[in-house]
Amino acid sequence: MQDGRTTLTQFIIEEQRHVAGATGDFSGLLNDIATACKVIANAVSKGALIGLLGNAGGENIQGEVQKKLDVISNDVMIRSNEWAGHLAGMASEEMDDIYPVAGEHVRGKYLLVFDPLDGSSNIDINITVGTIFSILRSPNPGAQAKLDDFLQPGTEQVCAGFALYGPSTLLIITSGHGVNGFTLDREVGEFILTHPGMRIPEDTQEFAINASNERFWEQPVKRYVDECRAGKTGPRGKDFNMRWIASMVAETYRILTRGGVFMYPKDTKDAAKPGRLRLLYEANPVGFIVEQAGGLCSTGLARMLDIRPTALHQRVPLIFGSKNEVERIERYHRELLTAA
Ligand code: AFP
């Protein structure tokens, strides 16, 4: 406790007291992740001052250009989390293969999956970016992780969260008992609980989608967006606002704060890709957080967290946010199926 304020460390320890038989492993892991996020926040905020903007000169396995800060953030996550004995392995959007915790380190009972810097194609224009993470139990605690160990549905997540590097540095986490938000007090170096029990309003008048893809959308998404755009005089009988930051962490935080719906749906742009965003690093952690805040997360046809992954870098259609809107979009998908 700091001047009556709850620090992340205190919050984690108090949560641990409610878990019978807790060893402190999970608390230690969350603390290490929070430390990594502070280091990344510092690098992101210094940016051009220490030569960290721009491209790293390579591509990741998804064929996306890697930024210097993608590579640095990935490295910080690995170095901060590999040594303490909590993990059997890690997987990252920026690495082709899994990262089993190596011989010189003690191996633990958890797996850590992360996108070290989501939204990083925006880094050079100073837009909010963030680190997304998901914690799973290793099926073989104490042994080096194997690829199959990571292919667990989102319902198996022990914890998920994201750090947001914007005007404030925030850390949003859930371990299945609601969603709590912490703000980094830079002078003190601690995350402080500032947003307890975050809830997503069930209704909204705001949607987020990359409208430049409209010609590739499938009918249910086109129908939904057309109806929103028709405003007061259309079937919805109210005006909607549209937002697109192209940084999913920033959009997720907006939706957690004031509601809304986010769509990166299945489209016909590239038949080889069932969606743009990744199941393990993006859709599952966000899905866990959103559900814990009272919202929904879906592919359009199925609950995201129920999907059994078949590949590490699997892409999925992603629709999440205010409950009543996501239910409507799912209904539009079902209606198309039954009409066929
Ligand atoms: P980057 O991390 O490569 O910037 O990708 C960001 C992202 O995965 C997600 O955060 C955005 O919502 C989405 O891609 C933006 O995609 P478009 O550029 O197609 O709008």
Image (tube, rainbow, N blue to C red):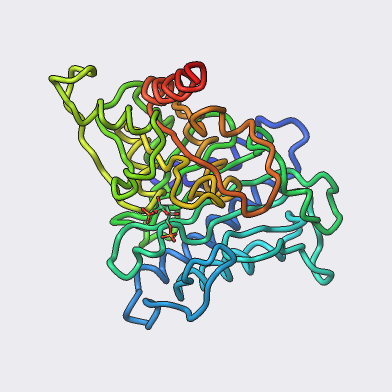
Does residue 339 sit above or below 103 in this rendering?
above
Which percent across, then down, holds residue 246? 34, 53
Question: Measured from the top left, where is residue 65 in percent x and y?
Answer: 47, 71
Residue plotted at (55% across, 49% down): 278
Q: Is residue 125 above or below residue 179?
A: below
Q: Which residue is pictured at 62% across the width and 54% down the height? A: 313
Relative to the observer, which residue lies in front, 224 or 126?
A: 224
Above or below residue 44? Residue 137 is above
Front position in the image: 306 or 302: 302
As rendered, which of 336 and 20 lies closer to the eye?
Answer: 336
Quarter-wise, where is residue 293 in the image?
Answer: top left
**Residue 10 can be seen in this image:** no
Quadrant holding ligand 1? bottom left
Question: Which residue is pictured at 44% across the width and 27% down the height?
Answer: 295
Res 239 visible: yes
In the image, 234: left or right of 157? left
In percent of width and height, residue 144 lies at 83, 59
At which x and y percent is residue 48? 32, 79
Farthest-out residue, front: 340
Left or right, residue 2 beside residue 337: left
